[in-house]
Amino acid sequence: MTRDLTVAEVRLTPILVADPPLLNTQGVHQPYTPRLIVEVVTADGTTGLGETYGDTEYLDLARPLAEHLTGRRVTDVNELFALDLDLAVDASRTGAAVDAGGLRGVRSADKLRLSVLSAFEVACLDAQGRASGLPVHALLGGRVRDSVEYSAYLFYKWAGHPEGVAAEPDDWGAALDPAGVVAQARRFTERHGFTSFKLKGGVFPPEEEIAAVRALAEAFPGRPLRLDPNGAWSVQTALKVAGELGDVLEYLEDPTLGTPAMAEVSAATDVPLATNMCVTTFGEIREAFTRDAVQVVLCDHHYWGGLRNTGHLAAICAAFGVGLSMHSNTHLGISLAAMTQVAATVPNLHHACDSHYPWQAEDVLTERIAFTGGRVAVSDAPGLGVELDRDELARLHRRWAEDDGTLRDRDDAAAMRVADPGWRTPAMPRW
Ligand code: GKR
Ligand code: MG
């Protein structure tokens, strides 16, 4: 029997998800962060799931896109990308030069469009997989590994959000110095078995972060270590850190801002440089690769436009001899499942991927995805292999609906001002 895979309905559900007080160079995570859950329902009753950033500007684009998708088939994913060209994404929607306080790289209309499209693409692939009985990785050409490795994503953090702020408690404790960072890393290994570690830096002066990475190297000898200050350092500072940590770092991630500065650092050190900030779109590849500014690209399938574009990026990286891994922002299990499915198909994935998922105690899945030995098993179940918990989705949506608007857009600087009213987004380079 031929199934009718025409899209009958697209459901968009914005939610707010609990987030611990994780520190970065812009400030601190808000107690709740916005995500958007996309459900694509076909005429024969198959539902595909997708997830992306949930800030207002993403939602504003998702609504017209959902209307355009209705009546088309979930197998016409190329058309989905083409039809989107008709959608007006004017400059006023993208406003500033960088995204989310500077943490997601360049901010352009096209990248915003792709970030929204990625959730629709994933939902269409999930629906195709469910309808055909095939896992998403099979739709992408098949897996080349049966599990995907992730790294422990360490953050400096407070024990809790500031007093008086409505928030969910977490059991990770504070991490504000080398001992705290090592204790957090141990907890990560006990809970999830991770064997490589990334520290989010740019929070304290570089000497303190160098000391934290040294402490990690002593506690976990020979393990891959990364440090990511989100571009907070000058070229000179980046080179100083590279000089001091060169013997223990797998790579330095975005030590400084922009391709020219990254190229300058790269030319003067042997420590590999990784990025999820200066190469976040296809248009940025040529300059960065020809100038040898980066040796590893951390792909975020949301802003690269989905799983098929991730494959295209992987091929370009392979052609240039540039490594590939994956970036992560606060996300739930649908996105982790999507990352894992596509990562399973990429032959040249030689570094453990990032994931914020262990920090998210809440999820919209009936069953959380588990890390075993720091790895996620690649599901061979139809589609993404995950099921939606409708009660939980409704609860997290209620939280979004009841919010007065202050948490519907990520703003780490605003969250920091609650504790430190004088806080301003630091001018870069900060050190
Ligand atoms: O969540 O604080 C954070 C991270 O700093 C995130 O926003 C970054 O986009 O994880 C990201 C990174 O690796 O740069
Ligand atoms: Mg990064």
Image (tube, rainbow, N blue to C red):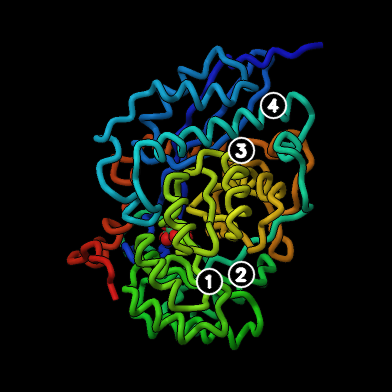
Image coords of residue 180 (percent x, y): 49, 80
| Front: mark 1 or 4 | 1
| Front: mark 4 or 2 | 4
Residue indicated by mark 1: 272
Which SS class for mark 3?
helix
Residue in front for this viewpoint, 247 or 322: 322
Q: Which mark is residue 128?
A: 4
Above or below for 234 versus 424: below
Ligand 1 within 8 Å of disc 4? The answer is no
Q: Does residue 313 show up? A: yes
Q: CA distance from mark 2 to mark 3?
A: 31 Å
Q: Amino acid at mark 4?
A: Gln
Which numbered disc, 2 or 1, marks the residue that appears first in the sequence? 2
Ligand 2 within 8 Å of disc 1? The answer is no
Label 4 crowd bin: few (<14), some (14–19), many (20+), radius 10 Å: many
Q: Is residue 55 left or right of residue 44?
A: left
Which SS class for mark 4?
helix
Above or below for 81 versus 250: above
Quadrant containing the C terminus is bottom left
Choose top left, top right, bottom left or bottom right for residue 367. Answer: top right
Which numbered disc, 1 or 4, marks the residue that appears first in the sequence? 4
Residue indicated by mark 2: 188
Q: Amino acid at mark 3?
A: Arg
Choose top left, top right, bottom left or bottom right for residue 260. Answer: bottom left
Label 1 crowd bin: few (<14), some (14–19), many (20+), radius 10 Å: some
Q: Is residue 414 left or right of residue 237?
A: left
Q: CA distance from mark 3 to mark 1?
A: 27 Å
Image coords of residue 19 (percent x, y): 45, 55
